[in-house]
Image: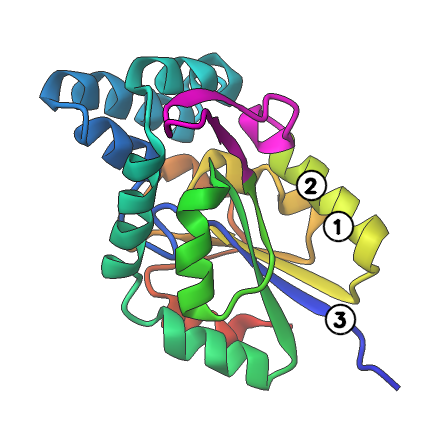
């Protein structure tokens, strides 16, 4: 008989990795583009403006290529949270299945997920033409808007029927999942967002602390 499923769901940017992928894509386009996009990202992650207010606009400004996105995939791995591998191993040993739930981009996150041995990535698809130039994103995907992460949590509960769900993340979009999960763990190694720290059941600054908190 299969053991009951327990899901450990983690944000990617500024949680599993030190970087914000969309900001790094902007950096590849020059300092002016980077400054504009980084400011928009911080406003959204702090909850000062909605995710949907900036999601498409940042990509419109950046116009990332397929090659750019592959480069961010490499950077995610280079900047992986230093205790992530050991923490995920400990969680798996305790019967937890890790998953990534992100407002970032699936093709950029996939290499990091493979590096960490994470099978399932819930994130936004990007679309490119035959030359590898940007033509759009999956506008229907929930994490492109506020309330999208809890929506995906509810869908995962229906699909997978997990016994437990724990969410780990640094942003307000992650904090939104708190009513839908058994435990929300705020994360602050790279950025401590006051709203997240205040609203989290537990707040940690290293993923090494997560396995001992799993119910």
Name the residue carrying label 1: 156
Q: Quadrant of the C terminus?
A: bottom right
- Identify the element where label 3 is drawn: loop
The image quadrant of residue 37 is top left
Residue linked to disc 3: 5
The segment highlighted magenta reads 124-147
Can see residue 156? yes
Position of residue 109 relative to residue 65, above or below, is: below
Q: Position of residue 93 (x, y in %)?
A: 57, 86
Q: Residues within 10 Å of mark 1 (few under 14, many from 20)?
A: some
Most extreme residue toward the right is 1
The label shown at residue 152 is 2
Point 60% across, 83% down: residue: 94
Left or right of 192 in this view: 177 = right
Which residue occupies 43% across, 68% down? 116
Cα distance between the residues tagged 2 and 1: 6 Å
**Can you say whether 31 is above or below 167 in the image?**
above
């Amino acid at each position: 008989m299969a053991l009951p499923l327990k899901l450990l769901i983690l944000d990617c940017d500024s949680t599993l990795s030190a970087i914000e992928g969309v900001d790094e894509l902007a950096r590849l386009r020059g300092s002016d583009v980077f400054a504009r996009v980084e400011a928009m990202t911080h406003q959204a992650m702090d909850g000062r403006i909605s995710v949907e207010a900036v999601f498409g606009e940042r990509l419109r400004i950046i116009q990332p290529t397929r090659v750019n996105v592959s480069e961010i995939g490499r950077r995610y791995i280079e900047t992986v949270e230093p205790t992530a591998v050991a923490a995920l191993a400990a969680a798996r040993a305790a019967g937890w299945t890790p998953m990534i739930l992100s407002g970032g981009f699936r093709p950029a996150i996939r290499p990091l997920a493979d590096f960490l041995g994470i099978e399932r990535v819930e994130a936004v698809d990007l679309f490119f033409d035959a030359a590898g130039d940007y033509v759009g994103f999956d506008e229907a995907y929930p994490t492109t808007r506020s309330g999208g992460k809890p929506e995906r949590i509810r869908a995962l509960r229906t699909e997978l029927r997990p016994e437990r769900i724990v969410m780990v993340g640094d942003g307000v979009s992650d904090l939104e999942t708190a009513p839908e999960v058994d435990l929300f763990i705020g994360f602050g190694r790279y950025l401590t967002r006051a709203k997240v720290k205040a609203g989290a059941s537990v707040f940690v600054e290293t993923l090494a602390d997560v396995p001992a908190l799993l119910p």
